[in-house]
Image (cartoon, helix red, strand yellow):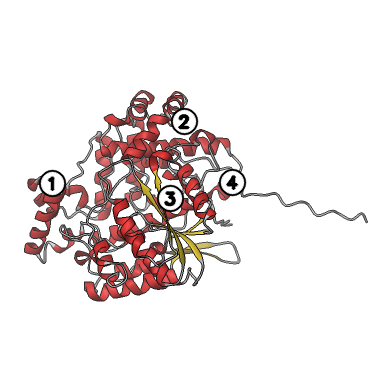
Amino acid sequence: MSVAADRARTLAWLAGAQTDMSQVAVRLASLITVPHPLDHASMFHSVHAVPPGQALHIEPDGRAAVRQWWRAPEAELPLPEGAAGLRRALREAVAARVRPGERWGADLSGGMDSTSLCFLAAEAGADLVALTLKARDPAREDVAYARQAAGRLPAGSVHLVFLTAQLPPYLTGLEEGGEPQDEPLTHRRDLAQQQHLAVAMRAHGADRRLCGQGGDQVVIAPVNHLHDLAPRHPLFVSRRLSGYATKHRWPRAALLPALADRRSYPSWLHSQARALHRGRTPGEGPASLLGWAPAVTMPPWATAQARHTAADLLTRAAAHASPLAGTRAAHFWLYQARQAGRVASVYGHSGLEAEMPFCDDAVIEASLRVRPHETDTPWSYKPLLATAMHGIVPEALLARTTKGSFTAEWVAGLTAHKRQLAHWCDTSLLAAAGLVDPGLLRRAWLSPTTLTARHLVAAEETLALEAWLRDLAAHPVPSHLKEHPHAPTTAR
């Protein structure tokens, strides 16, 4: 007999299933780059997830089978034709949501993704309440680009600029906990900020919000498309790799071995498991970016038990794993799009219904149809989206090549909540499970300025794992489950 539900926690509660700590262990490496097929695996024993693009069929006798209903298209269109398809898909995705005269909140970060959605929403007749964050980093150009965009939006549009330094710092409310989702995600870091912004947009009449989430993952093919092209177009690949090597400061000597690596996907998974067992940390250069996926690396505070547990899980996965597509680029491009959809779900907790057109099936399909090497170059930024938005978004905004980050906000949040983080280190559920060294974790959480960029991301993701385990312990019964009242019985 098979039982299905739309939430893993529902089934876990019904079955009395415990948290699968091996899944927790592998997510210490990363919450957003856990290798396929573990990226969508259930976090609970005896509960099995239906993979994206597949559907569960349950027969009348209770037998169940998972069948594929969606396949990625072939990447065969040249840039002009592919951009026309993306423009059409994005325009229809926005128009399906927006009606003339409706007031919509909209992120206007100054980046190409959110700016494109703002102009498409204005084209569809929406009255916009556009929102921009001014980060602590004085070198960021986001506000300047956002003001340019706001000045070109229709009259009547409202543009709100918020200083992140004047908003609740990252991790505000962390100690209060909350209802856990089916899996750990990093949505808690700026939840208080997002709730503050939602109130501001509502005050201006908006009850829905457009977000550019997914653009980075959907409209740019991963760099490993050059690995696929190398046997047929070695000179082209050599020129491109030279540009990427300069841009990312890769050692040139590492390029040839990375291109020569012809391992299958299962073999690649096995290699990641072996590296974890041996305690080695692969580099982040060409070998990682030209491989099937980013290398699986554990942070310094992960224990040997965590490494071996994650390695064993990878080994078991490799025994039956197959890539999402036939080439490295197609596999990882589709993987990226799937991750965008997972992260998009967290925005619903801000108190304002959020819409992410870049995560629509039609938009993803339109992007995946384009030849990978035409969607990204070392010398231009998002050429596919820029070409698609030509004539809709002002050219000066499409020419932007920089991208900011909120590293300073994350460090400020860790610093502001040192006391709470110190308490969590002393009572860590991850440490109790043998997965982290509490002393090393304390050093990471309480001294964030000493961390490298990669380890700063890992510190955030470890915090998300710890918060999720604590929320599970505090909310053993999912709040969405309500007991139906018993119907009164009639005496006979």
Q: Earlier in the sequence, mark 2 or mark 4?
A: 4
What residue sits 41% from the left and 30% below the top? 416
Label 3 sits on a secondary structure element that is: loop
Which callout, 3 or 4, points at the residue further toward the start of the chain?
A: 4
Distance between the alpha carbons at the discs numbered 2 and 3: 21 Å
The amino acid type found where label 1 is placed reads: Trp
Depth order, front residue of 423/264: 423
Q: CA distance from mark 2 to mark 4?
A: 23 Å
Check disc 2 and report its element: helix, strand or loop: helix
Task: Name the front one of labels 1 and 3.
Answer: 1
Say which amino acid is labelled 4.
Ala
Identified at 57% across, 50% down, the residue is 11
Disc number for residue 41: 3
Crowd class of label 2 (few under 14; some 14 to 19; many from 20; radius 10 Å): many
Give neighbour class at mark 1: few <14, some 14-19, many 20+ (Cα, 10 Å).
some
**Which residue is denoted by mark 1 in the rendering?**
250
The residue where tag 4 is placed is 15
CA gap between label 4 and label 1 equals 50 Å
Give the secondary structure at mark 4.
Answer: helix
- Residue 380 location (% of width, % of height): 18, 60
